[in-house]
Image (cartoon, helix red, strand yellow):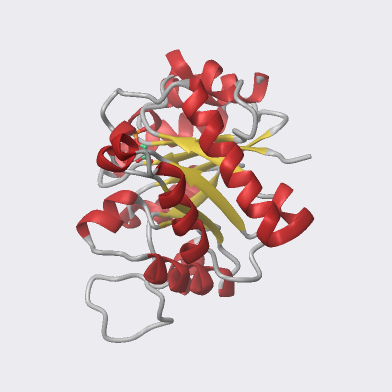
């Protein structure tokens, strides 16, 4: 039985005062079947752990190297040192604007595992790939290239995020989500045998309180990676509640 996971990605949003939102979430009763994760910007990680209570705190990226001459980058060990227990890797915004390839992502995942960080690996097609009918080929290639050997459900979460649904208010149909998640599950079980059933699969892209219950009714959707709607405690709490009730 997989526990559910509601993960919030604050992206490049949030100042110290915004930790009040996290504090409000942390004081709500803990859901029974759902783990909660909030990934604030790196500048807030240490302070976030002070108010997060039972909510896990994660980074939004890490470098593949342990340390060294990498100006502006952050290592997995630094995230752990701040009190983080997870890290988002291969988000489409980093694949697009920082040129991250599947191989880059896989190296970062291996670095994260070494520091006992849960790796939340993001995959998903852009609109041209969706329109060309190559979505499953693309996400198959991303799964093959971004997940190192030895992955388990305890160390790794997969987030399916169609690029065209991120921050746009446009959401795939439930059939499209089901097709992608079924494909991801089948791909994981063919590579990792029974362990493939242990990975949690998150949907991401314009998840809101209004559409959350429908999305969580889809088979093989074990939770969500939420951007914009994770910035306000009331919205994220409504999504957490919908997930826990699903
Ligand atoms: P969104 O972002 O919820 O604002 O669409 C999701 C994500 O990029 O993880």
Looking at the picture, how far across and down is residue 159, in whole percent? 49, 45
Q: Nearer the viewer, residue 103 or 29?
A: 103
Residue 72 at least partly seen: yes
Query: Residue pushed farthest bottom?
Result: 68
Looking at the picture, how far across and down is residue 213, in whole percent? 55, 17
Location of the C terminus by quadrant is top right
Q: In this view, does 62 lie above or below 118?
A: below
Residue 66 location, quadrant: bottom left
Residue 240 location, quadrant: top right
Looking at the picture, how far across and down is residue 204, in whole percent? 43, 36
Q: Which of 170 and 140 is in front in this view?
A: 140
Q: Nearer the viewer, residue 61 or 43?
A: 61
* Residue under the image location 40 percent in, 25 percent down: 172
Left or right: where does residue 244 sit relative to residue 49? Answer: right
* Residue under the image location 61 percent in, 52 percent down: 187
* Residue under the image location 59 percent in, 57 percent down: 156
Left or right: where does residue 149 sit relative to residue 232? Answer: right
Rendered-image quarter of ligand 1: top left
């Amino acid at each position: 039985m997989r526990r559910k996971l509601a993960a919030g990605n604050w992206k490049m949003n949030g100042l110290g005062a915004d930790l009040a939102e996290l504090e409000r979430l942390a004081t709500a009763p803990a859901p029974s079947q759902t783990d909660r994760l909030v990934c604030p910007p790196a500048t807030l990680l240490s302070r976030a752990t002070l108010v997060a209570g039972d909510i896990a705190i994660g980074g939004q990226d890490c470098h593949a190297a342990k340390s060294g001459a990498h100006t502006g980058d952050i290592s997995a060990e630094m995230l752990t040192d701040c009190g983080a227990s997870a890290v988002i890797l291969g988000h489409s915004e980093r694949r697009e604007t920082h040129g991250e390839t599947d191989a880059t992502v896989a190296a970062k995942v291996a670095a994260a595992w070494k520091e006992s960080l849960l790796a939340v690996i993001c995959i998903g097609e852009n609109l041209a790939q969706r329109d060309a009918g190559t979505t499953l080929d693309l996400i198959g290639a991303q799964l093959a290239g971004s997940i190192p050997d030895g992955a388990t459900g305890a160390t790794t979460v997969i987030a399916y995020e169609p690029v065209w649904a991120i921050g746009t208010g446009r959401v795939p149909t439930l059939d499209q989500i089901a097709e992608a998640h079924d494909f991801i599950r089948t791909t994981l079980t063919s590579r990792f045998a029974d362990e493939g059933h242990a990975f949690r699969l998150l949907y991401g892209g314009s998840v809101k309180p209004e559409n959350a219950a429908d999305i969580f009714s889809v088979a093989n959707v074990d939770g969500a990676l939420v951007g914009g709607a994770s910035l306000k405690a009331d919205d994220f709490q409504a999504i957490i509640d919908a997930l826990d009730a699903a």
